[in-house]
Amino acid sequence: MTDSNSSIPQAMSIDMSQPNDVNTSSILQERLIDAEYKIWKKNTPYLYDFVMTHSLEWPSLTCQWLPTVKTLSTGGAGGSSSGGTGSSTNGGGANGANGANGANGANGSSTAVNSSMGDGAAAASASTIGVGGGATASSTASGGGGNNVGQDQTSAAAEHSILVGTHTTGEQNYLMVASVNLPLNEQVVKDTKDTLSSDTNGNNNGTNGDVNGDTNGNNNKDSEEEEKPVATFTSANYDEEKNEVGGFGHAPSAIGKIEIRMKVKHEGEVNRARYMPQNHFIVASRGPAPEVFIFDLSKHASFPDENSAPQPQGVCIGHDGEGYGLCWSPHKEGMLITGSEDTTVCLWDVNSVTKGPGSSGTTSTTSGTQINPLATFRSHTEFVEDVDWHHRDENLIGSVSDDKSIRIWDVRKGNTSESVHTVLNAHKGDVNSLAFNPVNEYLLATGSADKVVSLWDLRNLKNPIQNLIGHTDQVYQVEWAPFNESILASCSSDRRVGIWDLSRIGMEQTPEDAEDGPPELLFLHGGHTSKVSDFSWNRNDEWSLVSCSEDNVLQVWNMAEDIYMDDTMSVDEEDGDGDEMGDDELGDDELE
């Protein structure tokens, strides 16, 4: 298992079992979190292909990748690069991420790390910018004089979109769409072990990080300086309006930036928001009110008028309390299920709002078209925390509750008070989340307040087939990877996002590895300094995730490829061929 926080040095281990008072405990906890975060920043170049941190104005309890992707391009005939002389930046050093704490960054500022491309970065103002690269330094040219006329237009990045919301009291809340530009896979072209050099004579040859060129100019360093690369930037790269350093490799492009592109007024805080798979413009949301809101984003302006009121296209009326559980049917357009504090699960058909002749006039009203549930399932005895739709059987849905039970329902059954399968006391605490496997029709995952992620076989629900132990606080969300049936992720109140690989269950471990967790715990993302509320897998970019925490931080990240590749390197190390890998590992003395 790879923990992005590695291990806390002994000097930083704090016993808070019996603090003198509450204030002392809070101070010690803050120091521990700060120590963990500093270690995470130091390990970032070795554990991630890229990390981007964005400080939202208000915290978000929900985040989900939208399916839209737009390829961006750089270069092209007639284009010219800025600056008269190119400047180089060095990345990959363990000390290159010494910016301000990402959790306390300036509102609306974005920061980025790109380790696969060997890009470096430096902290500017209140922004936190990590570094990328391997164990040795790499240089990339930024800027550069001259004209790019005649060069082929190349794709540098792809623009992805994220659905988020706000969670604040006393202020207007919004459902928002943010854009983030991710590097294309073909941009990662150089082994990060190699020390790269870039042409700084104004030829702008450093775009892809594969720049074995001339070093005439300002890039001449003695051998001692090359051993300790320092991430640098020029004032030309700094955007004063956005308080951030531009792009990967400090290119003038927008790669790595996270920007809010759309805001839709929402009644109350956004507890959760999810788009409809068949039409990503249709979004359902939950808030503190019992109603479920349906928005058609194509009928809203990018930014609303200040004096306008929230205008959902539809309002689902049927619950008596607030809720979080929300899931669209992957099989039938317009079918939605929701869970609530009132202990019920409701089934809705919103097609009357999203299409049909009667839906055209709904945008002019504040309340929207009212929708009544098709069915209300009543069997839980406490708050229904989450719901999910089976990926193979269009008639099966699942729900979990604070009553510690799992219930599987058949939407065709006339008796809505009886579930087809019930697991009582499935966990020792509240069950917060469930997810059906998208490929294996019998596999189900649940996350609970008892800190455990459990795997269940729908053919025999008497006991879980496996308990995944790795979190140290309650688990909020679980979600299967869309590209691999054996990969599962979970987020927790312990400030971590865990990545699990079920194919590693039962794999032999050394005693040292066993101390870090079970073999199936592939990776722990430790970039957050507060409870992680939600996360989402990117269906258009494998291994890329977005996660949000209660301290306003939104992070987009992709773990290093070496972590999830087959264990070929481990076999080589056992045969005595793994000396090269050992040079990249951080020792305890380097972490102190």
Image: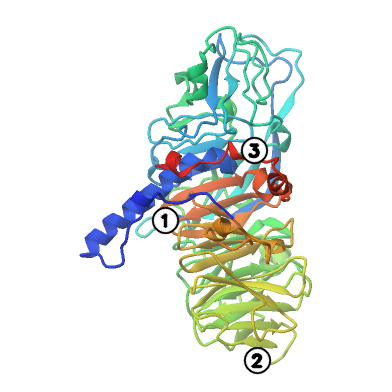
In which quadrant will I find the N terminus? bottom right
Q: Do the numbered discs 1 and 3 sit on residues whose CB atoms are within 8 Å?
A: no
> Can residue 257 be seen by looking at this rendering?
no
Most extreme residue toward the front, as rendered?
576
Up/down of 525 relative to 397, above or below: above
Q: Which residue, given by chain and number where applicable, does mark 2 sit on? A: 418
Q: Quadrant of residue 408?
A: bottom right
What amino acid is found at the position of numbered circle 3 in the picture? Asp
Q: Which residue, given by chain and number where applicable, does mark 1 sit on? A: 530
Q: Position of residue 23 (x, y in %)?
A: 23, 60
First along the sequence among labels 2 and 1: 2
Query: Is residue 331 rendered to the left or right of residue 311?
Result: right
Judging depth in this view, the residue of 99 and 59 nearest the camera is: 99
Q: CA distance from mark 2 to mark 3?
A: 60 Å
For image coordinates 68% across by 55% down, the residue present is 280
As drawn, the label of residue 122 is none
In which quadrant will I find the C terminus? top left
Judging depth in this view, the residue of 231 and 63 nearest the camera is: 231
Q: Which residue, given by chain and number where applicable, does mark 3 sit on? A: 579
Under tag 1, what secondary structure? Answer: loop
Judging depth in this view, the residue of 181 and 199 nearest the camera is: 199
